């Protein structure tokens, strides 16, 4: 579920307006609107804070717990593709730095 859907669902379940949720979460109504319209992406901690302000609790994960912390084997190709999409989206979200051109010292022979 997207953060936008999650926030909208939590807010509506609590019977709050965007302005009321913003006040409770310590932010502004335009910020809540931008999150709900998927125009901005909240950090995980911000998402947790806003969901908590709506009286809900955010739980992250696949809905299972593995004993050693590793993911269990995928059951079918659809689950494998869902996991691949999650990994690619996560990789795409990692900020990149522009590459700098390598410069080498000039060697001169005298």
Image (tube, rainbow, N blue to C red):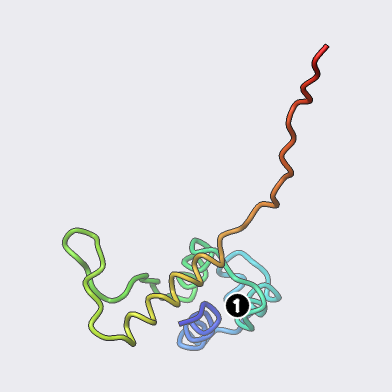
Looking at the figure, which quarter contains the C terminus? top right
1 vs 17, left or right, is left
Work out which residue is located at the far right of the displayed protein and give it: 110
Is residue 66 left or right of 81 when viewed as pictured? left
Crowding at dot 1, Cα within 10 Å, few <14 / some 14-19 / many 20+, comes out as some
Q: Which residue lies at the image location 77% right of the left edge and 22% below the top edge?
A: 107
Residue 31 percent coordinates (x, y):
67, 72
Label 1, on which residue? Answer: 20
| Residue beneath the point at 37% across and 70% down | 60
- Where is 54 relative to 92, above or below? below
Q: Secondary structure at mark 1?
A: helix
Count of marks placed on residues: 1
Report the residue that reaches farthest toward the front. 110
In the image, taking residue 54 as reference, residue 76 lies left or right, namely left
In the picture shown, does residue 97 fall above or below 63?
A: above
Query: In which quadrant of the rendered view does residue 102 lie?
Result: top right
Residues 96 and 54: in front is: 96
Q: Residue at x 60, y 64 (%)?
A: 26
In which quadrant will I find the N terminus?
A: bottom left
Q: Is residue 60 above or below residue 95?
A: below
In x, y percent, where is residue 17?
60, 84
Q: Estimate the x, y position of residue 86 in percent, counting from the top left.
A: 44, 74
Q: Quadrant of residue 8?
A: bottom right
Given residues 10 and 90, the one toward you in this image is: 90
Residue furthest top in the image: 110
Q: Residue at x 23, y 73 (%)?
A: 64
Residue nearest the observer in this picture, 75 or 7: 75
């Amino acid at each position: 579920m997207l953060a936008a859907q999650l926030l909208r669902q939590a807010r509506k379940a609590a019977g709050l307006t965007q302005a009321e949720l913003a006040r409770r979460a310590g932010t502004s109504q335009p910020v809540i609107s931008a999150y709900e319209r998927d125009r901005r992406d909240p950090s995980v901690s911000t998402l947790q804070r806003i969901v908590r302000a709506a009286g809900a609790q955010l739980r992250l994960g696949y809905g299972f717990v593995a004993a050693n912390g590793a993911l269990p084997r995928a059951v079918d190709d659809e689950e494998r593709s869902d996991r691949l999409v999650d990994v690619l989206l996560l990789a795409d979200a990692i900020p990149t730095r522009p590459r700098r051109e390598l410069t080498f010292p000039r060697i001169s022979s005298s």
